[in-house]
Every structure is written in structure tokens, then in C-alpha cells.
Image (cartoon, grey):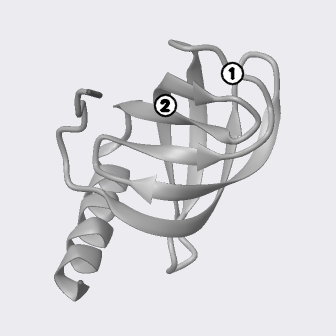
Amino acid sequence: MKIERRRAERIRVNLKARWEGSLTQQEAEVTDLSVTGCFVLSGGRVEPKELVRIEIALPDDVAIYAWAEVVEEASEIGFAVRFTSMDDNDRDRLQWFIRRALAAE
């Protein structure tokens, strides 16, 4: 049985994103999002525990930026990250976006 590690409610999304790690910079799509992390659908190689910088375009065309740690890598599909650092304005916008999406469900 797989243990659920998520600590925050998550939403399914299709948001354009870009990320960069130690070896590459890639265009991507975020398909699963919470205030603590996301799943990045993308090519490119990452390693568990690698620190990446991610830019996520919210629907209002305002991007949020975060540093994140890779927590799981899904070969040739993408990877899951846990946000480690984000400025207060970006965190507030992310929380507002998620609350609004949850209320609409």
C-alpha cells in the first residue's frame, strides 16, 4: 500500500510552465497543483532531491515563481516537486487561485 504524503488539497490543472535545473531548461505543463507542490509534465532529466526553479503561468497571465525540490521522478513523463521557497506575493496568489478552484468544484 502506498502511503499518501501530500499535506494540502490539490487541484487538477493545465497550466503552462517553465523550469530549470542543474542540467537543462524546459517548457512544461503543470497538471496537479497544491500550495505545497505540483506535478510537472515535461521532458528533461531531473534527479530526486534536485533543486529546480519553476515558473507557473496562472490563468490571469501572471506568473508565479518558486524554488522546489524534486520528490519523485516519472521517467519520460515528468516529476513531482515540493515548493521550498516562494515570495509572499506569489504564495498569496497561489493560495487564492487554489481556493477559488476548490470553491468552484
- Percent position of residue 56, x then y: 56, 56
Left or right: where 26 falls relative to 70: right
- Quadrant where the N terminus is found in the figure: top left
| Residue type highlighted by circle 2 | Trp
The picture quadrant where one finds residue 17 is bottom right
Residue at the spot of label 2: 67
Residue under the image location 50 percent in, 25 percent down: 72
Left or right: where 6 falls relative to 64: left
Instruction: Say if 75 sits above or below 8 in the image.
Output: above
Residue under the image location 39 percent in, 31 percent down: 82
Could you classify mark 2 by the number of other residues whose Cα lies within 10 Å: few (under 14), some (14-19), or many (20 or more)?
some
Q: Nearer the viewer, residue 53 or 41?
A: 41
The picture quadrant where one finds residue 10 is bottom left
Q: Which mark is residue 87?
A: none
Instruction: Say if 4 sits above or below 57 in the image.
Output: above
Residue under the image location 58 percent in, 41 percent down: 54
State if disc 1 and disc 2 touch (CB < 8 Å).
Answer: no
User: Who comes first in sequence, dot 2 or dot 1?
Assistant: 1
Left or right: where 64 falls relative to 35: right
Instruction: Say if 13 sits above or below 76 in the image.
Output: below
- Percent position of residue 76, x then y: 76, 36
Residue at the spot of label 1: 46
| Residue type highlighted by circle 1 | Val
Q: Nearer the viewer, residue 95 or 43?
A: 43
Secondary structure of residue under mark 1 = loop
Could you classify mark 1 by the number of other residues whose Cα lies within 10 Å: few (under 14), some (14-19), or many (20 or more)?
many
